[in-house]
């Protein structure tokens, strides 16, 4: 058999090894956290020698970045598929908020790794994760732009502030959960957040809402959010978050 004929087999074998390493790394990072994750254990679970990992990844941090990148790419694909079947600004915006909350609820360990170890790093803006995160939040802003174009939302909206409002609110509501303290209801929290956001963004059929009235409406929604959080029972802290200190709060990049 010629070398050219054998080449695809070698390439597939490499892809399989990388996939096995990525899966093992994801499991170890989720179970042990970043600091206590060992390359030797990742290699053992992937059934490769430790040196093989450094053929494909520079170091442990690079491996974590690639794991989070893969996670984001999967989420973006899922979002695009599901959004295609949802119509209406409120429904589409609620889906994006709900899905983000559901992701935190379903995979707190990976979310914690993202917030605690990647996003606060000095090299974050040069990683693929940063670019993927911008695409991720851009999906939400595209929905807001569509709402402006259809006349449902005010045209004077500062989009970056809307982004920070949505994702900052989600982070504030879920940070205790990521620390292993309490729980939250994804559906009720999504409803409350979308109501809060749209209270400030929607056009009104009647006279404009004066500042005190709008403040009262926002306060009532905020109280609903506080009430939902207080009703949730405490839960066991995930291993990767047991010594966590709160990362920077606010919107994503």
Image (spheres, helix red, strand yellow):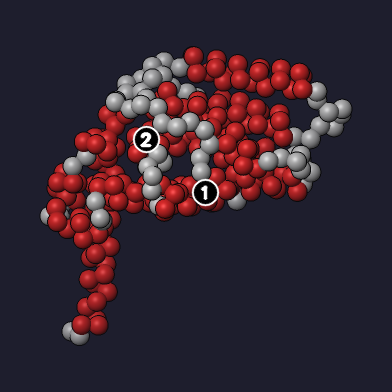
**x then y, percent, for residue 53:** 20, 55
Query: Quick check: can you spot residue 20?
Result: no
Residue at point 65% right, 27% down?
A: 196
On screen, residue 196 above or below 30: above
Choose the circle earlier in sequence order: 1 or 2.
2
On screen, residue 166 above or below 45: above
Residue 134: which numbered mark, if any? Answer: 1
> Which image quadrant is residue 103 in?
top left
> Which image quadrant is residue 3 in?
bottom left
Residue at point 29% right, 44% down?
A: 26
Q: Is residue 22 left or right of residue 76?
A: left
* Residue ID for mark 2: 116
Q: How many marks?
A: 2
Residue at point 52% right, 51% down?
A: 135
On screen, residue 72 above or below 4: above
Count residues near mark 1 (Cα–Cα under 10 Å), then give few for <14, some for 14-19, many for 20+.
few
């Amino acid at each position: 058999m010629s070398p050219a004929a054998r080449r695809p087999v070698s390439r597939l074998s490499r892809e399989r090894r990388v996939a096995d390493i990525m899966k093992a790394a994801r499991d170890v990072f989720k179970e042990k956290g970043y600091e206590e994750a060992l390359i030797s254990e990742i290699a053992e679970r992937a059934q490769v020698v430790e040196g093989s990992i450094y053929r494909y990844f520079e170091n442990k941090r690079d491996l974590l970045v690639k794991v989070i990148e893969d996670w984001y790419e999967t989420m973006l694909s899922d979002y695009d598929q599901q959004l295609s079947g949802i119509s209406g600004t409120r429904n589409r915006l609620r889906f994006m908020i709900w899905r983000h909350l559901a992701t935190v609820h379903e995979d707190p360990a990976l979310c914690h790794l993202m917030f605690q170890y990647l996003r606060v790093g000095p090299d974050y803006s040069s990683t693929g994760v940063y670019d993927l995160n911008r695409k991720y939040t851009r999906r939400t802003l595209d929905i807001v732009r569509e709402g402006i174009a259809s006349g449902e939302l005010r045209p004077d909206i500062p989009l970056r502030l809307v982004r920070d409002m949505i994702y900052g609110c989600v982070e504030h509501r879920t940070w205790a959960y990521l620390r292993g303290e309490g729980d939250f209801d994804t559906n009720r929290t999504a409803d409350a957040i979308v109501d809060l956001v749209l209270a400030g963004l929607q056009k009104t059929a009647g006279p404009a809402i004066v500042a005190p009235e709008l403040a009262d409406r926002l306060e009532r929604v905020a109280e609903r959010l506080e009430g939902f959080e207080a009703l949730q029972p405490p839960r066991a802290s995930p291993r990767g978050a047991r010594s966590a200190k709160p990362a920077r709060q606010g919107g994503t990049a």
